[in-house]
Image (cartoon, rainbow, N blue to C red):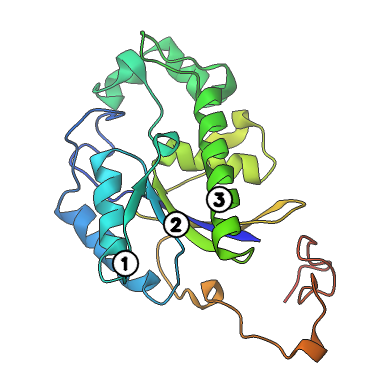
Amino acid sequence: MATVLLVRHGLTELTGLVLAGWTPGVHLDERGRGQAAALADRLRPVPLAAIVSSPLERCQETAAQIAAGRHDAQVLTDAGLGECRYGDWTGQELKQLAKDPLWRVVQSHPSAAVFPGAEGEPLRVTQERAVAAIRAWNDRLSRAHGQEVTWLACSHGDVIKAIVADAAGMHLDLFQRIVVAPCSLTVIHYTETRPFLARLNDVGGAVDDLLPPKRQPRSRSKPGSSRSGGDVGDAAVGGGG
């Protein structure tokens, strides 16, 4: 079972005002740096096999805060985790974009949304490449570190929402119901049979459940078993403890 910790980058001066997209040179502001430092402190006890980030500066800086102080930790980069390519919408104020007819499509039928211009991409393509990146890293890190591997991916709001929608079995047209705040933590366990969405939009609290489980004596556990009594990929019947 591979566990991925999805982290949205911290606040920037443009967050909530301008659709930054792939605009270069968008850095964390003072608030964002504080958010990233606080999250890094929360996650300090959690062993991470890798820290992988979108190429954009605001994600790289957030990931670097989390990597700081971890022995031999480095930030790896994967363009598959990069922001949606908003094309001609990039760099425009959100209040102006809300007047564009495409805005209603993005809100109510995002699987049909294709952003304008030569650099624009469909939202469904954003989801496809982001989910493919997550699963590729799951496979790579599981082979290198074992099946119970935990790693972190730093990305963007719409990208994380799209990954969550896939993990939850939701159609992309429902992904606007998901909220992913700046520097929030979302956790997904990927098993052979299904993903489990363990945390969503978490902005505070303990992380004890993300620590490696204590080893049980061999005589008390069976290979492939779980605490719920079934296979690792089984859901807890009755809701679990």
Residue under label 1, please give it.
72
What amino acid is at disc 3? Arg
Q: Residue at x 72, y 77 (%)?
A: 241
Q: Residue at x 55, y 64 (%)?
A: 145
Q: Residue at x 23, y 41 (%)?
A: 57
Task: Identify the element where label 2 is drawn.
Answer: strand
Q: Is residue 202 above or below residue 155?
A: below
Q: Residue furthest front?
A: 144
What amino acid is at disc 1? Asp
Question: How far is the residue under mark 2 from the one under mark 3?
Answer: 13 Å
Question: How far is the residue under mark 2 from the one under mark 1?
Answer: 15 Å
Q: Is 172 situated left or right of 22 in this image?
A: right
Residue 202: percent from left, percent from top: 46, 60
Along the viewing direction, whichever of 144 and 173 lies nearer the viewer: 144
Residue 239: percent from left, percent from top: 77, 67
Residue under label 3, please give it.
140
Question: How far is the residue under mark 3 from the one under mark 1?
Answer: 19 Å
Looking at the image, tell me whether mark 2 or mark 3 is earlier in sequence order.
3
Q: Residue furthest top?
A: 117
Q: Is 165 situated left or right of 73 in this image?
A: right
Task: Identify the element where label 1 is drawn.
Answer: loop
As drawn, the label of residue 152 is: 2
Residue 81 visible in the picture: yes
Along the viewing direction, whichever of 225 and 86 lies nearer the viewer: 225
Residue 215: percent from left, percent from top: 65, 85
CB under 8 Å between callouts 2 and 1? no
Q: Is 185 situated left or right of 235 in this image?
A: left
Instruction: Determine the image quadrant of residue 43.
Output: bottom left
